[in-house]
Image (cartoon, grey):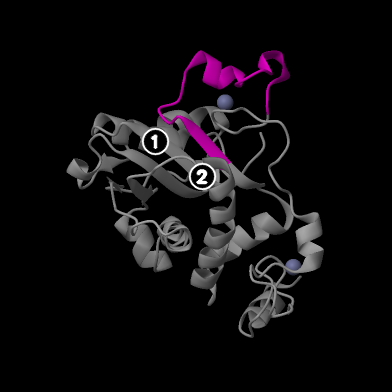
């Protein structure tokens, strides 16, 4: 679908968050029946720690990467695989007139997965992967913060707290080779309101997970600030 059509459809609710087509107002999640049938849910067998597509050789619990070096987070979950209409919707979330609405809607959808996967965990705080001040000026908002706000509202948690900062921009992860991503994020984040992390079980929200390097680095900063445990949740993960 052309972007202009997508955006003009977005201006006349209710419409599907994935394709922009009008939908029955009784569909509470803003997903049309056609998209719902085709959405790439991340429900295949996956690493129980990082959520990536499972390496069959280590198929019982975790992937080769988690087995070699346990991440700083205990678990990361994603609702979708990053492709097709899910990838389109996440790209549209970062620009255009309805970007906040898309972020809120994807947050509500991710909340369903959180309820299923993390329903028995008591989170003391919900936080999000920060973006730099320069990027906030450019985009107008941090999409991960809006996702986290929608999740907290939906699940009845206290509002998200800023526990991390990104003092300056680094080369975009998506512009780098997989191997370079891990070193690129080292030192990119610093703690904020660190006292609020001490001994807490924290839920960390982001939009997309690729290698998990960003989430791992954020979890490392939170653990070093004294967090007891960090769990992650993203809208979609890239299957690599
Ligand atoms: Zn649709
Ligand atoms: Zn893993």
Q: Position of residue 155 (x, y in %)?
A: 46, 57
* Numbered disc in front, either 2 or 1: 2
Magenta stretch, residue numbers: 54-77
Q: Classify residue 78 as left or right of residue 43.
A: left
Q: Is residue 234 above or below residue 34?
A: above
Q: Classify residue 176 as left or right of residue 215.
A: right
Q: Residue under circle 1?
A: 230
Q: Residues within 10 Å of mark 1 (few under 14, many from 20)?
A: many
- SS at mark 1 in the image: strand
CA–CA distance in space, label 2 to label 1: 15 Å
Q: Position of residue 121 (x, y in %)?
A: 44, 40
- Using the rendered image of the protein, determine whether residue 185 is visible from the camera's viewpoint: no
Which one is in front, 37 or 199?
Answer: 199
Q: Residue under circle 2?
A: 119
- SS at mark 2 in the image: loop
Which one is in front, 36 or 184?
Answer: 36
- x 42%, y 59%: residue: 156
- x 36%, y 49%: residue: 127
């Amino acid at each position: 679908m052309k972007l202009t059509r997508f955006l003009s459809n977005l201006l006349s609710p209710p419409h599907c968050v994935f394709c922009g087509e009008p939908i029955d107002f009784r569909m509470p999640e803003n997903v049309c029946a056609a998209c719902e049938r085709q959405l790439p849910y991340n429900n295949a067998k996956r690493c129980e720690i990082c959520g990536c597509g499972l390496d069959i050789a280590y198929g019982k619990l975790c992937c080769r990467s988690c087995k070699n070096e346990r991440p700083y987070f205990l678990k990361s979950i994603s609702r979708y695989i990053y492709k097709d209409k899910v990838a389109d919707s996440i790209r549209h979330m970062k620009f255009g007139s309805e970007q906040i609405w898309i972020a809120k809607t994807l947050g509500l959808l991710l909340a369903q997965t959180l309820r299923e996967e993390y329903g028995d965990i008591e989170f003391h705080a919900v936080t999000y992967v920060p973006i730099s001040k320069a990027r906030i000026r450019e985009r107008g908002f941090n999409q991960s913060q809006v996702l986290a706000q929608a999740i907290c509202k939906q699940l009845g948690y206290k509002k998200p707290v800023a526990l991390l900062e990104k003092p300056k921009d680094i080369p975009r992860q998506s512009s780098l080779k997989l191997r370079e991503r891990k070193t690129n994020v080292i030192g990119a984040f610093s703690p904020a309101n660190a006292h609020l992390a001490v001994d807490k079980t924290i839920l960390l929200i982001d939009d997309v997970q690729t290698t998990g390097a960003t989430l791992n680095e954020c979890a490392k900063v939170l653990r070093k600030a004294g967090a007891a445990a960090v769990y992650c949740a993203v809208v979609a993960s890239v299957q690599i």
